[in-house]
Image (tube, rainbow, N blue to C red):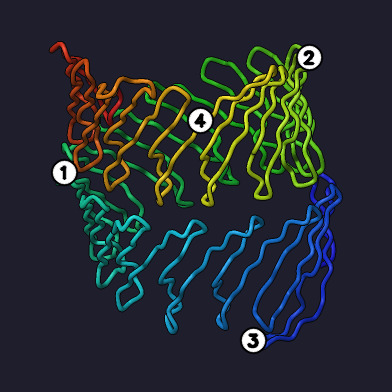
Amino acid sequence: MTMHREPGGERYYYTWAWFEGPDDAAWRVTGHHTDSGEQYRLDWNLAERSLCVTDSLGRTRCHWWDAQGLVTAYRDEAGQMTTFRWSDEERLLLGMTDAQGGKWRYVYDRLGHLTETHDPLGRVEQTQWHPVWHQPETEVDAAGAAWRYEYDERGNLQAVIDPLHQRTVYGYDRHGQVVRITDARGGDKYLQWNEDGQLMRHTDCSGSQTAWFYDERTRLERVTDAESNSTRYSYDGNGHLTEVMFADGRTERYQPDAAGRLVKYTSPAGQITRWQRDGQGRVRRQTDATGRRTAYEYDAYGRLTTLTNENGESYRFRYDVLDRVTEQTDPGGSRRVYGYNALNAVTAVIYGGERGGEIRHGLERDAAGRLTAKITPETRTKYRYDAADRLLEIRRRQHDAAEGGEPEVIRFSYDSAGNLLSEETAQGVLQHRYDVQGNRTETQMPDGRTLRYLYYGSGHL
């Protein structure tokens, strides 16, 4: 194949060459370009098992692989390296060193099941596997909370036991489809399926039913809720949704282009919104029901460079070699500049006014990417987490605070299932309670007042 064209008209071109290497011989793509201006050169070095791809902006990314075709290293357009280590015979990923130097390690059982994941912070997640069905029997997170799974004689998941020992049970039909779910408090939900495996009926714990109906092409045709209200769906000959009619008679209409991309929407009130797209399907202009227009401009690589709103005001965006937004300029001339670390997490935001002057917010992160501190001109805020990434504490201190001055502190606690139990500030403690389904049932305020929550059926407030 040397060219293909999308329904929108955009054409993609490819050039090829024959390569012979130590592992194989084959035709390989050496160049690629599009009508919209994207251009790529592919440089193969089969002797050293590498491929480097360079675009028309001069950005280059490279991959290296071993004799088995497994990627051993990747260098991105910024020169940052990620490396991978594999087992010799099983071809299992044993370790990875990310672009920031963080090391990940993976352990497997004799059947090749992943049993341990070690992250750059030294945390470990563990999985034990069923000896017959090769499905997880126990999963333990880095904080030690365990989820357990039971299976029937056919290998269907029969029960899930959460860290609070609450049990959810599943029943199946002869086709292996779930037809009953019994929650931790004993409530039953029932599901009915058609011969194509599509859900036809759902009955919740209170007996309320929702039904789904499909046409001969298995497209959703109608949904009827517990109060017998029906919503109907219509499609064109290509299977694209064209109309939704609600139970009260209101109708939404959708008009797709030849590629199935939305170009016109008519609301129930008759208001029309239109979209103009380019050959790659990107929205170039949106016109609302009042005739106001929003325009979008892109570079050759599909990055949004200018957004002009209904009032003619423009926002502009700039990017780095990794396609990350580095600068945003609003209509008034104010700028926001973003800095990133090697893991693509934002580490700095600089706010610049149209009259000069800058305000810098620094963001510090740990090896797992979690935000650990935010520094502004006025304050330093620290964040502390548990091993399961749940936020435990926020501690904010003014830079000009007197020596020994008390910081503002918010603390959080959780149960082993991850439910928030308390929020503590200088003004007092909020305490929360939950039912066996994880629904919040009560919140006790610092002054002793209590908010209670009532649910029905499968957890509707």
Disc marking residue 164: 1
Q: Amino acid at mark 1?
A: Leu
Residue 236: which quarter of the image?
top right
Q: From the image, tell me which residue sits under label 3.
A: 23
Q: From the image, tell me which residue sits under label 2.
A: 291
Question: Which label's residue is closer to the chain start, 3 or 2?
Answer: 3
Q: Residue furthest front?
A: 403
Q: Secondary structure at mark 1?
A: loop
Q: Give residue 323's position: percent from left, percent from top.
A: 66, 46
State which mark lies toward you, 4 or 2: 4
Query: Which image quarter is the C terminus in?
Result: top left
**105 is higher (above) or lower (below) than 382:** below
Q: On the rendered structure, is 429 left or right of 393?
A: left
Q: Give residue 460's position: percent from left, percent from top.
A: 30, 25
Q: Secondary structure at mark 3?
A: loop
What is the C-alpha distance between the residues marked 4 and 3? 51 Å
Q: Foreground: 217 or 352? A: 352
What is the C-alpha distance between the residues marked 1 and 3? 53 Å
Residue drawn at the location 51% of the way across and 30% of the way down: 361
Question: Which label's residue is closer to the chain start, 2 or 1?
Answer: 1
The answer, for residue 272, to whether it is visible in the render is: no
Q: From the image, tell me which residue sits under label 4.
A: 361
Q: On the rendered structure, is 449 left or right of 180?
A: left
